Each structure stands twice: as structure tokens, then as C-alpha cells.
Amino acid sequence: MTAAIKEASRESIQTSIEKQKQFFKAGSSKPLEVRKRTLEKLAEAIKSHEKEILQALKQDLNKSEMETYATEIGILLEEIRFTLKHIDEWAEPVKVKTAKTHVGSKAYKVPEPFGAALIIAPWNYPFQLALSPIIGAIAAGNTVVIKPSELTPNTSNLLTKLIHSHFDPEYITVIEGGVETTQILLQQPFDYIFFTGSVPVGKVIMEAAAKQLIPVTLELGGKSPCIIDETANIPLAAKRIAFGKVTNAGQTCVAPDYLFVHQKVKEAFVKEFQKAIRDFYGKNPLTNDTYGKIVNERHFNRLTGYLQDGEILTGGRVDHTSLKIEPTLMVPRDESVPVMQDEIFGPIFPMMEYDALDEVIGFINDRPKPLALYLFTSDDNVSDRVNSSISYGGGCVNDTLMHLATPYLPFGGVGESGIGNYHGESSFATFSHYKSILKQTTKFDFSFRYPNAKFGLKILKKLLK
Ligand code: NAD
């Protein structure tokens, strides 16, 4: 039986948000002990539902047990553990220096929660991307409404079950639904909106949020380039790039989208890429049960359309019944074909060769700022040049994807690839307003600041120059 999404009514949505706002106003989500206990409970809930999580992701995306554990379960447990370890320190007021004009006073930045937060999640990591932002939201003292993706209904249903059976809906709740439900949610008086999804929908979210001046974080997508220069360790580069491209069958926001390879190492790379795919999935990835499927027929048809956009070097087979597409390396006909225009979001990898690094830098800088960039080189001058001349959200030198799996690095885009960031302390900061408080002394009072004070202007000119 296929899972179905239970769309909520406008009235029930309004009631849920009103209740959350009351819960927040009563201060119920703010005590540090409540936040910690909630995070511990969330970790326990994830652990106790492990089997169901594995099953839902198998049904929705054919994710293997190893992939689901690494990218949907383990990463969340690690984020909760890290947050619990540091939350006391992050929640403390931060004392800052006093300016010479403010002698005698003390100044602090005090983190406070925004209130009721709305989290809108995509389908590609439907469990992780619905829950990862709530770790920061809870740690910072907010209430949370989660809107999972309707395209992965088994995971959406499971999130509802898991959250509703462990938490008070006035504190944390799930509202399932598609575009219509999201639009009703966007009309509610939330205090923060955290959106993960595509660039076009990101614009819809920001426009709706602007109507009520609700602050947003937008975790978006786009085309993330990969560059291999002539000094790179080719077997390792090929293996790590293939890993980045086949994880979740390429349906990863930070998957390497297209490749620039130096002409001197092109042939060696093609061979090593083929070998890496064979090592991961054998001769026919389509029949390997651990290889992911495309989320639905619409995306399958969109992706198979790209196979007409150039010459296929390796891969290219598809299976309509299981919605699987073989990892495919291709040479695009030119830059104008759809595979070089759209975010691919699938296991198809267009490759272009280059001679001079400047061509590559120019090509990338002529396009929207990428969410991720991956450079494979042994030359530090090359990595300095690339990193100082291209703006992008985040990335790796000599690896793919791994920058997002450490809580020590903020994760987010820049320009069209997103606004704001999260993970680790950045999640706590994203869901906190840092209130600036100046505690003035009453032991003395400088009279020069008052209107018409004797020597007032003279002293001010000395102090403020
Ligand atoms: P999407 O933008 O289509 O949908 C995301 C969410 O928005 C879903 O919950 C959906 O129900 C809702 N939505 C869709 N259309 C809407 C509309 N018109 N009005 C209001 N809400 C709407 O994205 P997707 O297809 O689920 O995910 C794929 C995209 O997300 C890719 O572009 C990918 O790069 C990006 N992504 C980014 C990150 C990141 O961390 N930066 C992570 C994962 C995915």
C-alpha cells in the first residue's frame, strides 16, 4: 500500500500555531533544562525508531541501510551529541568590550529564541533535513512546526508518528502536506522560517516571509562545479567524486554537478571513474539493491532527457520500472544544453576538459554562485587561486560532500544558493536573536553628554574622531 499524506485544514493549522505561540509566551520552551531534555528525547526517539526509518527511506528512495545510517540517522545523532556538549556555553550571555565613551558600563550579547519556528523540508534527505534544523531551533529555545516533503510520503508519515508520540504538539509538531498546505503555513505569524529546497521555491518563501517581515534561512541548491587539475591524485579523486555523485543517486544538494578536468588527465580520470563505479556497485548498478532510485517518474523523465544532451562515455542505462539511472559520465554538446543549464540532481555527470585554469574560473564566475565547489589538486597555489577568486557556499579540496558532515563548519549557500547557514554552533546562532544589553553604572555620570554641557562639544570631539 502506498503511503498517503494527510493534508491539514486551514483551521487546524491556525490553531496549532496559536497554541505554539502561547506555549512560547508562557516561557515553556525556554529553560535550558527543557531544551536539553528535549534533545535527549529526540535522540532516543530516533534510536528507538531506527528500523522504521530504514524502512521508510528504502521505500521512498531505495536508500541502503549504510547510506541511511550515515546520511539520515548517524549525522543527526552526532549533531545532537555535539549540541548537548556545547549548549551551556552557547546559551551564556557573551560579555563584550566597553567603548571608551562608555567607561563604567558593562556590555553583553544575550541569545534569546525568536519564538515559533517553521521548518520546511525537501524530499532528498527527507528525515535528516526535517530534523537537523530543529536541533538548533530547540537548543535556542524555540517551538517548532515541521513541514516535511510530500514527495516522500513514507518518511513524512513516520516523522508525524515519531514527533507526535514523543512531544507535546504545542512545542513540536509536524504538519504534512504539499504546496497548498505550505502556502497556508506561510500566511501564519511565525517568528522564523527555515527553508531547505529549490531556488525558485526559495524565492516564493522569501516573498511570503517579507509580507510579515519574518526572518528566513534559505538552504537552496544550484550547480556545484568540480575541478580536477593535472597535479591531482586521479584514482583517489575519481573514487571521491564518484562517491559524491552516486550517494542518494546524485539527489544531493551538494553533489558535484558538472566537472572540469585538465586535458592531460582526462583519460586517466574516465578509466578510474568507471573503476570506482564498478567497485561500488559491480558491473550493473541497476540491478544492485543498494543503489538508490530516482524519487518519482517526473524526475526520472527529466533526468533521462539529459542523456540526449551529448556523448555518453560510461553508463547511460536506465530502468523505468525501478526508476534507476546508471551513474553516467558524458560530454555535453555545448554549454547551452539543459544538462549544463539546470541543477541535475541525479547520477548524470557532464565533463568538460580545460587547458588553462582561468577559463574555468571565468566560466564559474559567469554563473550564479554555487552551493559547493570541489577542487582536486596537489598544488597549494592552485587551491589558493581558486578559493580566492570564486565565491561559493562551502566545499572541499580533494574531497566531496564531507564539509557538510562536520559540526565545526557552518553549512549554507551564498547568492542564489542560499541565505544564512547552520550546523553546530551556527544552528544555535541561526535560531537565536542576540540581544545587545548595556548595563550602565550609577556610581558616576559624565555630564558632557547632556545638552549645552560645559566643554561638551570639545570633549566629544576629542573622544569621537
Ligand atoms: P522544492 O523547493 O520543490 O520543495 C521544498 C519544500 O517546499 C517542500 O516541502 C515542498 O512541499 C515545498 N514547496 C514546493 N513548492 C512550493 C510552493 N510553490 N510554495 C510553497 N511551498 C512549496 O525542493 P525539493 O524538490 O523538495 O528539493 C530539491 C531542491 O532542494 C534542490 O534544488 C536541492 O539542491 C535543494 N536542497 C538544498 C539543500 C541545502 O541544504 N542547501 C539540501 C537539500 C536539497
Image: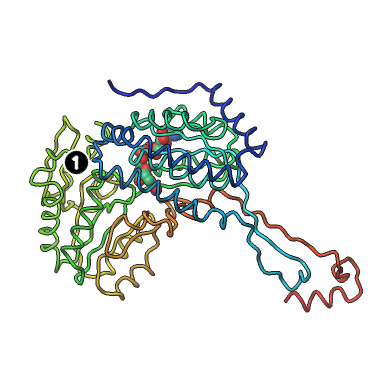
- Residue reaching furthest to the left: 283
Q: Residue at x 68, y 57 (%)?
A: 436
The residue pinned by badge 1 equals 290
Q: In which quadrant will I find the N terminus?
A: top left
* Residue at 29% over, 48% down: 341
**Nearer to us in this view, 464 or 124:** 124
Q: Quadrant of residue 455?
A: bottom right
Helix, strand or loop at disc 1? Answer: loop
* Rendered location of residue 273, percent (x, y): 14, 56
Residue 77, position as x, y percentages in the image = 40, 47
Instruction: Specify whether 278 is left or right of 49.
Output: left
Q: In this view, does 365 lie above or below 307?
A: below
Q: In which quarter of the image is the C terminus?
A: bottom right
How many tags in the picture? 1
Residue 364's x, y, as percent? 32, 60
How crowded pointer 1 is (Cα within 10 Å; few <14, some 14-19, many 20+) is rated as some
Colour approach in the figure: rainbow
**Left or right of 158 in this view: 283:** left
Q: Where's residue 16, x and y in %? A: 56, 27
Q: Where 165 falls versus 68 (above or below)?
A: above
Residue 182 at least partly seen: no
Q: In this view, does 69 lie to the left or right of 108?
A: left
Q: Which of 258 and 194 is in front in this view?
A: 194
